Image (cartoon, coloured by chain):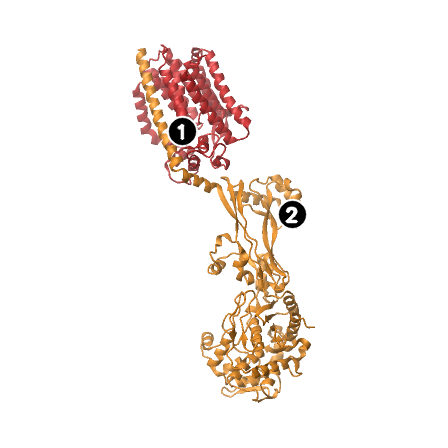
Amino acid sequence: MLIDLRSAVILLSLVGIILMGSLTIYSVTSIDIYYFLRFLAINIFAIVLVTLFFYQINLNRILSFGWLFFLGNILLVLSVEIIGKEVNGAQRWLDFGFLSLQPTEFMKIAYPLFAIQYLRFYSFQFNPFRSYFLLGTLFLSSIPIIIQPDLGTGLVYILSGLMLLFICGLDRRYFIGMGAFAILFSPIIYNFGLTNYQKGRIISWFSSDQTLSEKWNILQSEISIGSGGIVGEGFLNSKQNEFNFLPEADTDFIFSIYAEQFGFIGVFFIFLLLAIFIVFTTLFSMTEKRLTDDLSPYYLGTYFTLVIGFSFLLNILMVSGLIPVVGLPLPFFTKGGSSLLCFSIMLGLIFSSRGFLR
Amino acid sequence: MRNSKVHIYRGRTNLLLVIFLILLVLVTGRFFYLQIIKGDDLRNIRENNINAFEYIYPKRGRILSTDGYVLAEDRKTFSLAIDLEQKPSEDSIKKLSQLFPSIVDFDETRELVRKSLNSRKPEIVIEKLDQEQLSKFLVRSSEFGGFSIIEGYEREYDNHPSFFHVLGHMGYLTEADVEYFSPRINSFDPSIWRKVGKSGIERVFEEELRGSHGKRFYQRNARGTKRVITSEDSFQEGEELKISINYEAQKLAYDLIGNRKGSVVVIDLEDFSIPVAVSAPSISANTLRDITSSQYQDLLNDSNRPLFNRAFMGLYPPASTIKPLLSTFALSNQYTTWEETIFDDGFFRFEEEERVFNAWREGGHGLTDLSKALIESSNPFFMNLSIRYEKNKFVNFLESSSFGSKLCQDCYPHQFSPLIDDNWKQKNFGKDLFKGDFINLGVGQGYMLTTPLHLALISGILASNGNYKLPYLAISNEESLSISTDMSDLDWEKLNKALIDVIYSPNGTGFRINAGALKLAGKSGTAQVVDINSREEYDEVRKNINLRDHAIFIGYAPYDDPKFSIAVIIENGESGGRTAGPIAKEVLEDLLDVN
């Protein structure tokens, strides 16, 4: 097991992100030091375990069950409708007692496994039927997510799926067509497709009315970020968190608390680590000498890397007020088993598919 | 084929990477803007959201009597309030209602808790716990999560009713108070004061007594429930104020009036301070603090008017007690001499208007000079003088005796005795003063009205040969005043002698006072409440107590070196000499330590 310089850089940047995420979770909940250690341990343990798991099992074998994962996940999402736990007016959670899972998160993993299995069968050759079939299954499978209602996760799921198809070489005319459709029909979708809760979030983003309750979260988030200044208030010194001004400080808005504690320098540091991790991992996979006939590992590796990168990006765009609030977790920061497990599986798949730990 | 796949894969991945990096740069710019350009502003917003302060109400200054008794002071109170940090549970409300079954009702308290948590105001459950209740709660306080003790101050007055009118009382700030205090107190901020002095010393010396607020700085969470106290500026206690009231004499004077209505005012002639200012009936100054609004209404509607300060506000006809003062006017302007005599047959006939005025004694006093007119109180003598008075000189003289102007700067509320001149009569009756008016004015009836405080001052003016200062309760007046007379020392001596004889001569109207060793000089008066023209009418009027004459006495002692002057008014007390005089005697005896 040899690790070259580039692998070391990738691993180090990842460890940096995970460490900062765990520290921030600890500073927000600050229950005790064991909580922090447990979070860190679960994080690392999950990544290593999943990586080793997928490393041991041939990716081909996993891919041959892609359709099963996908179908199973859809059934899980539907089952949440019936036995799920309600949080913030949306049913998203399966409660196992020791672990609350949000099955929708895993759709971002199941769909590509299914799509790659399907495409590999046809040597990644698209024709109109296959293109419409893959787009159709993507959109249809997003319906149970969106009606939960979890528009944010649903949209991210669709965008992730489209990104996979984009990487895999789906003809660009489909993307142009869907883009035009989205723009033309967005007013209709807004009027008839969204709940008031979702509309409120969008209205608040465009409105300058500070009294809207939806605006409160974003305002408090911006206050947290700005209060950090250049060097930050210091670890464990987030007043916005201490005095409960920032709602959902341990989930969607955790990065604002990070920014308050570590300032612009800390923010820049995380962004740098993120850029290094995403760019290096992606470039690494593209310049790999052993690109074989079967491109599936590379498609999957690149896909998961970019999903992590864009998830991170969307969350910080949201907390800094650049896009509407769409309840998205921040990879390796947000407290919650599903998100942690989901991103760990992605990492495991990246590492095993790329095989640079070899 | 494979190469074109790889080509598309690399090209599109590169495109996504570029988009990712552009967005990352954009969001870095956003964080740069929020943290470095807007950082200070946003931090200020955060600090303003979190940091707050509240005022700590200061301890108000004590008020002491001239002999050092505490008349008013702030006492610490302990109230039971809802603690917003640890919301009271149903269980702890239940336990509290069991601890204080007669005071705390379970349902009411639960409602109060709900209100308190909604408004984020720590509502008071029990106001002013007594010692027993306090210790009962503190011993088991751990069982009543969500309730805590709040400390405060409350004004506590000497319980004797004689002090209420002088000290005044405290009350919640109203619009009218803001209007009153704004020009009087530097940088008066109505938003931070709950209670202010409403009357008396409490109002006049509000600025000195109040002290200044402390500030308690704290941090609060978004719901306003969690509080962390960060620092505290302690309050500045109000100044202690010593007033001229003599503790024992004040109480004695009130007790002597008993259940009658009336007033006693004493002036210390050394500095014209006021050692006694009593108005009866009165209430304990603590009463107003504790009563309900309906009980307050009852007090306002009480026909005996216990809230009305007769000493500074009550206007009474001075009747015969004005005669000595007007004697100095008559002598100075040669309207009469000590030698002039008239024959008093019990009537005065005003020939210009063909009117006849009855005097109080049937048959009159016979041959009467000025001394005798003072000692036996002859109305016809003074009526006869009155028609000689020149209007301008008379008005000037009254003005120099402080009619029509404020007598006491630190008495509140305060009423001045009206100056009776053409202006006054034009305003009230649409006519100028005419000769006939002077007949009544000359014997202290008709339009002439004085407050008990003014009568005590007039008595003091007589005692100190026409020189005086304005009386005070706490801050002395340095300006020396005198009445506009031209009296020789001999004139003053004779006047003084006549006033001594009022008390000590067997013919004197004050002989029955039996003043003994007090060395009292004075003048009694009987003020008619209704005009009476015949003996029969008089007997009729006597049956109604409220229409009986007011008894008045003014005096000073000791007459050879006057220390105190006094005025006593007993409403419907009829005879000044017999009713008001003995009260004056006892009060002065107490002040001068004469037995």
Instruction: Judge depth for marks 1 and 2 and give the one in front.
Output: 1
Image height of A113 relative to A36, above or below: above
Q: For this view, does B403 lie left or right of residue B544?
A: left
What residue does disc 1 label?
A268
x and y, in percent, of residue A262 in the image: 45, 31
Which tint is chain B? orange
Which quarter shows the C terminus of chain B?
bottom right
Q: From where the camera sits, is residue B376 visible?
A: no
Q: Quadrant of residue A309?
A: top left
The residue singled out by tag 2 in the image is: B134
Task: Write down the colour of chain A.
Answer: red
Answer above or below: position of B93 versus B554. Answer: above
Nearer to the camera, A103 or B77 = B77
In this orientation, which residue lies closer to the viewer: B136 or A223? A223
Q: Residue at x 61, y 42 (%)?
A: B93
* Residue B295 sits in quarter: bottom right
The image quadrant that residue A343 belongs to is top left
